[in-house]
Amino acid sequence: MNDWPQAWSDDNRGSRYGRGSASAQPEGARVMRQVRRGPAAPPGQGYGGVPPQPSYVNGQGHGGYDDAYDDGYNTGQVYGGGSGDSGGRGMREPRPAPNWRRRIKVTSITLVTVLLVTTVATYFWADSKLNRDVDLSKVIERPEAGEGTNYLIVGSDSREGMTAEQKKQLHTGSAEGKRTDSMMILHVGGNGDTLISLPRDSNVTIPSFKGSDSGKFYEGTGRQVKLNAAYAEDGPELLVRTVEANTNLRIDHYVEIGFAGFANIVDAVGGVEIDIPKDIKDSKSGADFKKGKQTLNGEESLAFVRTRYALARSDLDRTANQQKFLAALANQVATPSTILNPFKLYPTMGAGLDSLTVDKDMSLWDLASMFWAMKGVNGGDGKSMNMPISGNSANGNLQWDTAKVKQLVEQLKNDETVTVSDK
């Protein structure tokens, strides 16, 4: 029994042209017969379980395919054409245009996220490196707080952690303990910042105080000493207590840096450019400079700020050099070449934060405010001066001008523009 469609029957072919043609000559273009498939035969039926084969019919037929399949064959469409291919030649659809708005948005979000994470990580890293060893809560009988913020900035001659070779190189000597080599009050306010040097030889009275370690109360006896003796006697807390008692100005924050730390910061920032007004040569500090603008490394910078024996007014001229240099250092640290260069910023921050000793309430924001204020003083937005001096005291120390000091403190407390002169 032959179940093949009639059009393909062997009996109908005869001796015609080719085995696939129904005419003696190749037939012309005509509509391709539709292919329809019936439902699959259940298992065991058909020819040995094989589903029935498709049948070929002309025109409108019947079968397993739905009518949508007619569109491809009845119009002569060739296999491979996509649904949107009008020519039916099998070409791929063109790629959609890039969504630049979405790409820019994703990139921006990614960059902001990375910047935020880096900033937060840097903040906690830097905050953890601050040595908050000074407890100002131990200071007794403090003046009332005024407007603005007052920092006591101290440079000590601490040699802690320095090798013998470093002491020799930096000309620090090998004295035990530590003393204050320089002291300054920086007032940060809304009417211009003011940097005031307190000469180490200033004549002051040691007030009543509580021992920073023992907690024992020591009654004041009116004893008069050089200002740097207060630090040598009982450290930062007594120094703050002495400054407040002799000025009636409340100190909000304390910042201290030693010899080695100072030199390391300068080297980390790549040196500090400064204009030296005249030739300086001092064998005790190691200073040997010619007049003019030059860039000093860490060792040279330390020699410059410590020099006093080669200067006409000794300690007063030295405080002026210290102010000038610290302002130049702050200006160098705050430049875009340092802030925007991580290979310079992080070593500078690391060297600086490792070298600083601050009070327990000092934040990174307070520290940044201090440096920006010092930069402003150097840029002419503020004022730098010595504590007004009236002459020498009976014991040969520098005596403050009481009237001028009182006026200066009142202006600082009220956050007014300082008009007092140190001359």
Image (cartoon, rainbow, N blue to C red):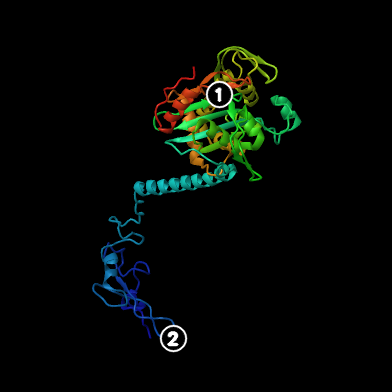
Among the 4 quarters of the image, the one containing residue 289? top right
Which residue corresponds to mark 1?
325
78 left or right of 420?
left
Q: Which of 137 and 361 is in front in this view?
A: 137
> What residue is drawn where x is 47% and y is 26%?
377
Q: Where is residue 206 in the image (x, y as percent from the top left)?
A: 60, 33
Which residue is outermost to the left? 60
Residue at point 33%, 78% (across, down): 5
Instruction: Please say if 279 is above or below 249.
Output: above
Q: Can residue 270 be seen in this view?
A: no
Left of 154 or right of it: where is 194? left
Residue 111 horizontal/vertical position (percent): 44, 45
The quarter of the displayed image where residue 350 is located: top right
Label drawn at residue 43: 2
Residue 228: which numbered mark, if any?
none
Distance between the Cα atoms at labels 2 and 1? 99 Å
Label 1 CA crowd tier, 10 Å (few <14, some 14–19, many 20+): many
Check the image and name the residue furthest to the right: 164
Q: What residue type is labelled 2?
A: Pro
Q: Is the residue 277 above or below the residue 171 in the image?
A: above
